[in-house]
Structures are given as structure tokens and as C-alpha cells.
Amino acid sequence: RLARALLAPVFPRRRDVERIPNLRYGDAGRRNLLDVYRHRSRPAGGPVLIHLHGGGYRQGRKNTQSLPLLYRLASRGWVCVSANYRLKPAARHPDHLVDLKRVIAWVRAHGPEYGADPSRLFVAGSSAGGHMAALAALTPNDPAFQPGFEDADTSVTAAVCLNGYFGPYYDEDRSSSPAGHVRADAPPFLIVHGDRDTVVPATEARRFAETLRAASAAPVVHAELPGAQHAFDLFPSARFEAVVDAVEVFADRVLKGR
């Protein structure tokens, strides 16, 4: 409540966007709920952006991060989804990734009910959410990460990683890292990182972008924000508005290039 009160003066909610909260996509109680953001005119056939929050896989919740991005895109006719997922210590890899795959499967099954076109589906995340988004984009339809829903299509159109982490998951091996799943047919990526990030050094994002470019034929756009720390999307700012602009341009080019 305090966070919402502090954010209210600097980030007024757009009146042309409605949030449909707490839709269930799995069986893990509150950790398997998602919110849908859409324009109040309820247009049909909008592209989809799924966003996963950060928090080191230990904390965080939907409806707290990258809000200017979700509201901006929804105001442009997109359907945006912000989801909770299971957290440590009750969950560990690949449980979080399985949850994201369930969100993707939910969007493909139910997105049209909310005006979405699931054939144009972007996955995005902040920090740990960026790690998860990258993994999901690089493991489409992998049955190892889709227990009980192996036949669902979990491929995505593109990925957006904001201050993402790209290394192994805690004490796991390289197979738990996005770099361990780089592939020639990877979808387009937008990687945005602060050059002053002291939690995940900017060199890690640079290295991942280089690894991806060396393997993939799809566009890999890497941008560094001068002076930006970790979690630059947590609070509204002119800097993050510029990032939202970049996401719009990237998404437009990806969709036009299909």
C-alpha cells in the first residue's frame, strides 16, 4: 500500500486502459495469478506483451514493475499481461520457467477473449524476470519445461530483457542460464541494461548479446543506459520513458519484418 501511495503522484494510471486483475493460470494459488491490461475500447487482434517482475526469484509481485511500459502499450492497442510466479525457497529452477510457460500457454488459449492476437507474442522481464524471459524465448516447446502441457505452443515472437541476469541459476550448472540455450533460430532480442548496474554488471549483458549475435540470425539489439543502476524500471522516470520508446520501435520493426 505504501508503494502504491508513493507512486500515485508520479505515475497516474491512464484512464484509457483497464486492468483486469487476478486471473488464474495455474494451481499455485496467489503465485499463479496474472493481470491483463487492455484499452477500454477493447480492440481485437492486438499484439501481446507478457512481463515478469524481478526480485532475485525470492520476492516481488505483478503490478509493481515496468508499469509505464504496460500502460503505454495497452493504450496503443496491445494486450499486456503481468504475472506472479512461484518464488524461492518453495520453488526453484525450473519451476519459475514452467510458470512462465504456463502463462504463455494461457495467453494462447485465452488471449483472444481479451482482444489479443497470440500469434504476435512478446515476452519481457526485469532482472530475474529477464532471465526467465530469455530462457523461455530460447526453449520454445521444450517438453522438459512443460510438464503436463507438453503439446502447448510456448514459442514467442521476440524477447525484451530489462536489467536482466544471464548467468546460471544460483548453484545450478550452465544449462540453467540463457547462454546455455542459445540457438541459431532464436527470436529477436532487445537487451537494455544500465551501465552503472552494481547487481548485474553491464559486462554480463554485453557478453550475452555477443554470444547470441554469434549464433542467431535474428536481430539482437543491445542498449546501455548511461548512469542507470539496477531496477531502473521500478519507478517512472524520463530515462525509463526512453526505454519504453525503444521497446515500441523494436516491436514495430519486429512485427513489420515478419
Image (spheres, grey):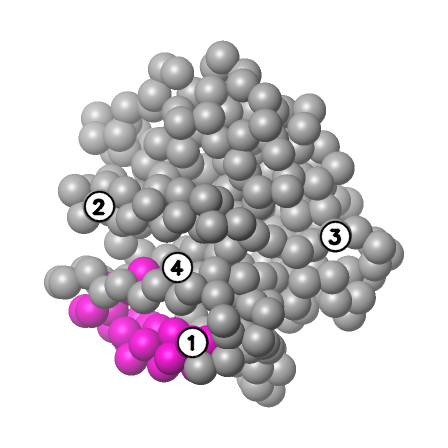
Image side of residue 150 versus residue 81, left or right: right
Instruction: Tell me which label, 2 or 1, sits earlier in the chain.
Output: 1
Per the image, the residue denoted by label 4 is 190
**Amino acid type of disc 3?**
Asp
Q: Which mark is residue 213?
A: 1
Is residue 205 in the magenta section? yes
Per the image, the residue denoted by label 3 is 153
**Helix, strand or loop for disc 1:** helix
Q: Is residue 17 visible?
A: yes
Percent across and percent down for residue 174 are 57, 85
**Helix, strand or loop for disc 3:** loop
Is residue 103 in the magenta section? no
**Amino acid type of disc 1?**
Arg
Cα separation, mark 2 vs mark 1, equals 24 Å
Per the image, the residue denoted by label 2 is 242
Please rate how many residues cluster around mark 3, counting C-alpha atoms within 10 Å: few if below 14, some from 14 to 19, many from 20.
Answer: some
